[in-house]
Amino acid sequence: MSSSKQALLPEGWARPKGYANGVAVKQAQGRQIFVAGMIGWDAQQVFHSDDFAQQTHQALSNVVAVLAQAGATPAHITRMTWYVTDKQAYLAAGAAIGRSYRELIGEYAIAMTAVQVVALMEDRALVEIEVTAVVPD
């Protein structure tokens, strides 16, 4: 069976920039995939940069790799939660993050939350991204 994903935008609301307020998924069969928080290190758990945008690119690449292992693509993502250690660094890197997002994820019909946190478990990590995806059978 197939699933359909619909971004939710209540009438009269301003369109959000870079995300959806909510996502409805109609699915008769299939499965959900839950991706743990991905950070900006490579597959061998090595950081190659302390730059916010570069760590974000790597974290998004890691999300894509985990999804692929489950036979999923970024098009199946319904929800993302971003944990950032520095709101100003996140905002300053917005253009570069947007480029990486469009390159690796590609669409904005995703319910998304971003939260500034005091720290992440890995000291060098600047961003952590977790994802929920819905994959039809």
Image: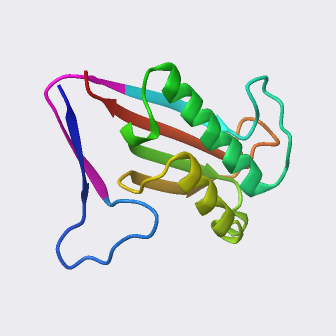
Nearest the viewer among 14 and 102 is 102
The quadrant of the image that shows the N terminus is top left
Q: Is residue 51 visible?
A: yes
Nearest the viewer among 123 and 37 is 37
Q: How many marks?
A: 0
Q: Is residue 37 visible?
A: no
137 on left or right of 40: left
Q: Looking at the picture, how far across and down is residue 57, in whole percent?
A: 68, 48
Write down the region rendered in magenta: 22-32
Q: Looking at the picture, how far across and down is residue 15, in whole percent?
A: 33, 73
Please tell me which residue is depicted at 63% across the width and 38% down the height of the picture.
61
88 on left or right of 130: right
Please tell me which residue is depicted at 71% across the width and 71% down the height of the picture.
92
Q: Looking at the picture, how far across and down is residue 33, in whole percent?
A: 40, 26
107 on left or right of 89: left
Quadrant in the picture for residue 17: bottom left
Please tell me which residue is depicted at 49% across the width and 28% down the height of the picture.
67
Nearest the viewer among 113 and 93 is 93
Residue 9 is covered by the magenta coloring: no
Secondary structure, magenta segment, majority class: strand
Hey, which residue is sitting farthest left in the picture?
28
Coloring scheme used: rainbow
The quadrant of the image that shows the C terminus is top left
Please tell me which residue is depicted at 43% across the width and 54% down the height of the picture.
107
Quadrant in the picture for residue 60: top right
